[in-house]
Image: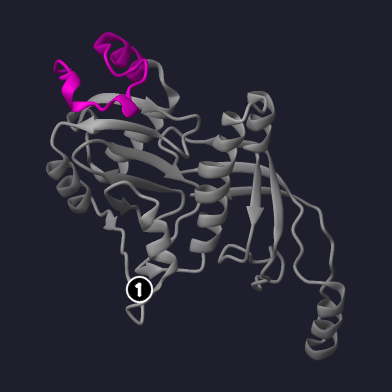
Amino acid sequence: MADIDPTEITEQMRTFHAEDVAEQAAWMLHSRMWRTISARFYNLHSIDLRKHVKSIVKVKETINAGFDFVAVDAAKFADALQHGGFQPDSRERILGILPSVGSVAALATHGQGFRENSEPSLHCAVADDYCNVHLDNIGIRLGNYNANAPQHIADELIWQDKILPAMLKIGISPHFVDLLRRVHPVVPNLRQVTAVTKEWQPRVGVELDIARVRSKDASKQVRVYIDFSHACSNSTCKIFNNVQGRTYDDKSMIFTIEVTGL
């Protein structure tokens, strides 16, 4: 790895990784986060991440927040992403005025964002001063931003990226915050299809992760969780039952084992 020019790293970006090349090399060798993300880049997109990372400047708490780094050449990294099939974030506005869900997600990105068209989804933020790569649990882009985007914003952009770090800053126990990382708010999204009827039932509530196991490149995943969300209110369920002749209920806890990527 090339020597680091300290003038390229702002004071805000400095961490214990930023000035020690040997420590960065050791982190890459032993970090599960680095191994998972770099394996996904290479296996799915033929991108060798090592060739684009000049220096690691900040390592976040989870793989869903990823890590920041100074790129060898930000423009070449962006070009490699597009050639590898990543889609650039869109900042479109509805009627040219109102921000769309996609533009809200893009505004949370430092620099230009690029996303995998898959789930889970690598999200890369590319800028001259520093870049970020992380793995979103929820893919939000299939051609245009779809109905998974609100779930991504509620869980990963607001709850995981804003609220939980703010709790740490005001002195709440890191052990308690780590426990809260297993909690995921639920808003209506495209994944809410019943296992038996295959019908879409929009729900709100929370999910609690019991365990989440990924393959080496996160292309496959087994997730065990408890779903505390509601498909409808009691009154709404009665209307559905009467009008459609089907049985809907208001049960608030479901134990789920989810296997993806097979």
Q: Residue at x 15, y 15 (%)?
A: 3
- 127 vs 32, left or right, is left
Q: Residue at x 30, y 45 (%)?
A: 125
Q: Quadrant of the N terminus?
A: top left
Q: Is residue 207 visible?
A: yes
Element under disc 1: strand
Q: Residue at x 46, y 35 (%)?
A: 63
Q: Provide residue 130's location: percent of width, then percent of height.
A: 25, 36
- 30 vs 203, left or right, is left
Q: Provide residue 212's location: percent of width, then percent of height.
A: 60, 37
Within-10-Å neighbours for mark 1: few <14, some 14–19, many 20+: some
**For this rendering, which residue is in front, 151 or 97?**
97
Q: Is residue 260 visible?
A: no
Residue lying at the far bottom in this picture: please name it: 243
In the rendered view, tell whether residue 243 sits above or below residue 26: below
**For this rendering, which residue is in front, 257 or 87?**
87
In the rendered view, tell whether residue 112 sits above or below residue 7: below
Q: Provide residue 157's location: percent of width, then percent of height.
A: 50, 49
Quarter where residue 189 is shown: bottom right
Q: Is residue 3 magenta?
A: yes
Quarter where residue 117 is shown: bottom left
Q: Provide residue 5's location: percent of width, then percent of height.
A: 15, 19
The residue where tag 1 is placed is 93
In the rendered view, tell whether residue 143 sits above or below residue 221: below
Q: Is residue 192 magenta?
A: no
Residue type for callout 1? Arg
Quarter where residue 218 is shown: top left
Q: How is the image coloured?
A: one colour
What residue span does the magenta drawing correspond to?
A: 1-29
Q: How many marks?
A: 1
